Image: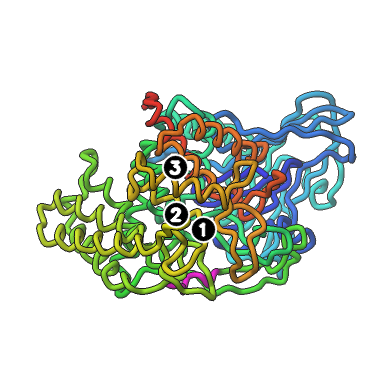
Amino acid sequence: MGVIGNCSYLAYINKTAEITWMCLPRFDSSFLFGSLLDAEKGGEFSVKPAGEKYYTFQSYVKNTNILATEFITDDGKFRVTDFAPRFYQYDRYYRPLMLIRKIELLDGNPFITVKCEPVGSYGAFRPQIVAGSNHIRFLNFDTQVRLTTNIPLTYITNNQPFILNDTFYLAFTYGEPLEAPLEATAESFLEKTVKYWTQWIKNTSIPNIFQEEIIRSALVLKLHQFEDTGAIIASGTTSLPEAPGAGRNWDYRYCWMRDSYYTLNAFNNLGHFDELEKYFLYIQNIILSEKQNIKPMYSIAGSAVPPEKELDLEGYMGNRPVHRGNDAFNQKQYDIYGQVLASLLPLYIDKRLNYLSYKKSREVIYWLLGRIEETMEMPDAGIWEFRNRMQENCYTYLFHWAGSKAAEKIAIHFTDKDMRTRAARLATRAAEKIEMCYSPDLKAYMQAIGNSNYDAATIHLVTMGYLDPSGIRAQEHLAALAGHLKTEEGLVYRYIHDDDFGKPETTFLVCAFWYAEALASIGKVDEAINTIEKLLEYSNHLGLFSEDAGRDGSQWGNFPQTYSHVGLMNAIYRIAAKLDKPVFL
């Protein structure tokens, strides 16, 4: 599939130009089109040849989030261009809940069919359809839902084939309908949206290696930021299984706080400070609202994630359950405090920003340090969100350490001696806890104190600078992890021991990018580059990465996964820094 959007909503489009997933009015709302999870209950919005024999080719318009699908049939050729309008207008970004589809004749006179049947409440109801003169209204939704088009409405309502002899447009709107001229407006919006995305990329700092991959990953990351609040979701889908029949089907349409460090680092590398600052403000609002602790994740509004509810849907390729909501919201995951502290550091030391003068800044740092101190001796569910296992996780202590070290540096800029002393003390204690995870016999750091499980998350002991990258211990640790978790294909399992659902069947893609970044950190740059080149084979035809990857090249898990793309970007920037490659500003 390809994905389009405008930072208000996302739409997924398969190789035959069907909208297989689109949730409105927010990323975490019910779908209006959801055949991805249920062919019968998911509704349909498709444009396709009338005959069964055809070929397709799909690509993004260069440096944009605009998707083009070309069809080749016995009768001719045509192109469907899909986009969500986004451009600067009246001193703000115009990003309506509107999907525009342009059907363009390229050759011959093919017959096509157009079908538009939205559904509501996760497929529980189908709306009443009322046809106007040049639009179709879909009733019984919470707001106006309308399709405006220059295609004869009878052909659409009857699902009737018709000859494509001109350029046609479809404007699907949720809320405010399109009242302006259809053709002129669609073309104007398309031109302005192309200009917006290409200009956004022109303002992106990229290295001179793997440029296309950085550009596509940056565009994917941008799509997943809900501009109204600044939140960045892990993925726009729910319940795409980590492996067939595994039952590991989760709703990822929320903002994980632990991703903040890696995501803000990626935006910093890209030089996009507007997105970085909006995401920080979203996090800051949460910190200042919480009285006792930060939850592992939040909705895009910064509110509680709803409890898991199983939906009566057939699931992707028959894989159930299908979930709405995520119970990991209530877990104890204490690495979050250090993650947020470490992610704040650039905001205080970068002279282009001015967070030192913000009145609440000192209060935020002290509050986060207090949570690290309070949870230092407590076991937690850890980065992998074990549901029936609480332990003293090495990764959690790493971020207690990293967050405390970041607070030390921030304290210098504040000239706050008490903050610096407290942060140093906590960093020392966190380091002691990390060392309790070390196994002299195995020459590696284990997942948690008292166990002997290898864990890919401990790769960050190298990339975060806890272990000296030039030291023997860093190299031995990476070698041990590779020996137990890395596949011949260059993929990396997050761990291989049993968890709540048995042993993981697929690899966690971001772990392989972490490994590539660690290789660059210890000076094995050629090996890091080779690893990245192999991993690129696990993207789809549009350069999009899933959450999980099978050794056979299959993609699993929610898609596209921002974590995977962020991992790719951070690895490439680390490689570029080691190569001393210039960055194009």
Residue type at mark 3: give it: Ala
SS class, disc 1 = loop
Q: Answer yes or no: do the residues labelled 1 and 2 have beta carbons within 8 Å?
A: yes
In terms of depth relative to the viewer, which is nearer, 87 or 269? Answer: 269
Q: Is residue 325 above or below residue 4?
A: below
How far from the left and from the top, in percent, is residue 344? 29, 52
In terms of depth relative to the viewer, which is nearer, 575 or 326? Answer: 575
Residue ID for mark 1: 454
Residue type at mark 2: give it: Ala
Residue type at mark 1: give it: Tyr
How far from the left and from the top, in percent, is residue 494? 55, 56
Q: Which residues are magenta?
A: 326-332
Q: Residue, x 64% and y 69% (percent of image)?
A: 501
Residue ID for mark 3: 518
Q: CA distance from mark 3 to mark 2?
A: 15 Å
Indicate left or right for 291 with 35 as reference: left
Indicate left or right for 385 with 505 as reference: left
In terms of depth relative to the viewer, which is nearer, 538 or 238? Answer: 538
SS class, disc 3 = helix
